[in-house]
Image (cartoon, grey):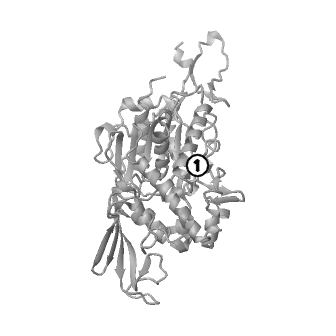
Amino acid sequence: MDDNENRAYHRPVWNDDGRFYYEIIPQAKANNYVAVCLKPADKVIPVIFIPGVMGSNLKNEDGEVWQFSFSSLKKWPLANAKKRKGLLDPVTTMVDDSGKILNNGADGKKFPSRRKRGWGSAFYKSYGEALDRLQYLLSDDDILMDNYFRKMQLQTARQRFTGVKIGDEPAEQVLTEEDTAHGHRFLYPLHVFGYNWLQSNADSAVLLGTYIRKVLADYRGRLAVNKVILVTHSMGGLVARHYSENLNGQENILGIVHGVMPDLGSPAAYRRMKTGERGVTGMIIGNSAVTLMPVLAQSPGPLQLLPGKAYGPGWLKIEGGSSHQSLPVNDPYEEIYLNKTAWWRLCEQDLLLGDTNGEWEAYQDRIKLDVKKFIEELNGQYHPQTWLFYGASADNPSDAFLTWKERPVLRPVPVMGYPEPSSPTYRYDAGKTFELISAGTPGDGTVPVTAIRTTSPRIRGILATDVDHEGAYAVDPMDRSRSVYSDLSDALMFTVRSVVKIVQQVPVP
């Protein structure tokens, strides 16, 4: 009798402790039964996703404040400036991890539930589907085991884009068969570090360190290496870098993948302060300076997205008749952010509400102690295994610079295509009307290409692609004709590949 006739394959069964065993029914020796126990990868390398600004759910002692839910969102469109300032206070808010989660039980007992891994702290509208897809791609080795039970052999996602280049990227960024095979030897539970994006990113970085240590402790005995991989979105990259490079966190991090990080800051932070947020988000958080400035002025996190000295001079231009001015000349903090008198200053004291003198003094301290110190100390600091992608498309016009341009004096009704005088993009000085105009330069719609540092000996891989800032980790590609993997965006593909490249440092278990 051919042993193959009585050969049977057995999948591993995972218990509540994340360990595996096999369920085999004993057979008589005479039956020549052969049980083939398929051994899975069992050593863990945790991956922690860090959202961007407005990307974590927040609550105060009265309940949810910032969450993608009907009860949370319905309160915002009609909220006045004072109410918004009270609700979005960095001192009284905290992370809310009760948000919606896609496919919470999809990972079985191999990992703790997605709820326990912090997925409920992520703003569902921005990250719900993306987190689910990212975990699927990091767990695609299940396909290899399924191949033992079917005639047609399938490839994992990582196998399908092995050897494939995105655009004109260098060959060393492309996965080899050896890279892919090595990457399949490990498990990658995806965690989410939600944080209070209103508070200073330096404070969030301290909490990130605590969270990383907890995650590592939870997998004690299962770890392939006593380190995690960080995947960040936008401002989350600043939190990760500060922890890694300025708080001695590098020893706990195997590598970092950054998506659309405003490395040098972005003039969009100035625009947001002066005119409010755009689109649906603006209806919620504030679509004018009147409603949004009181919130942002008290919030170190969003202020730390402003351009620092490394961004360079002249990103704010004032063009009025025959006069032209480009700022900053040397120091954006003194010339723009702390300027109290010029009409184009960042912060308008009379919009801060409450005791305006006290509010202004608190704002000044915030700029000097929280914002300037954080931005300038972080400049040029990267983990030695840094991989990043950014938006570089002209189809996503961004604010490489901003211009206050003099316009004809507005009348009470729209004339010549200009909006009502109450439009948030207009300011008035000495009888003149100025409109704030975006440069419309290539980027991701928020962060311009000029905000990205692309050269550093610590940056191992980089991808310039067509990606929207908020939807940087979106499941579907923006341009299917350009994607090398038909149902996956180039940015998400780059992210997974970068994780696999980072893991090449870890020896085979």
Q: Taking the image as drawn, is residue 288 in sight?
A: no
Report helix, strand or loop for mark 1.
Answer: loop
Quick check: 70 left or right of 204?
right
Count of labels shown? Answer: 1
Which residue corresponds to the image point at 62% horizontal and 58% vertical from the top-left? Answer: 67
User: Does residue 226 appear to the left or right of 162 in the view shown?
Assistant: right
Viewer-side residue, 180 vs 355: 355
Residue 207 position, x and y percent, is 58, 44
What residue lies at 42% left-to-right and 61% top-to-bottom? 333
The quarter in which the N terminus is drawn is top right
Q: Nearer the viewer, residue 195 or 47?
A: 195
Whether residue 205 appears in this view of the structure is yes
Q: Give neighbour class at mark 1: few <14, some 14-19, many 20+ (Cα, 10 Å).
A: many
- The residue identified by callout 1 is 194
Give the side of residue 237 with respect to residue 329, left or right: right
Where residue 282 appears, as percent x and y from the top left, is: 53, 68
Counting from the top left corner in percent of width and height, residue 277 is at 50, 67
The answer to which of 15 and 76 lies nearer the viewer is: 76
Furthest toward the bottom, the residue is: 412
Q: Is residue 176 above or below residue 5?
A: below
Camera-nearest residue between 498 and 286: 286
Instruction: Tell me the amino acid under the disc marked 1.
Output: Gly
The answer to which quarter of the image holds residue 191 is top right
Residue extending furthest toward the top: 30
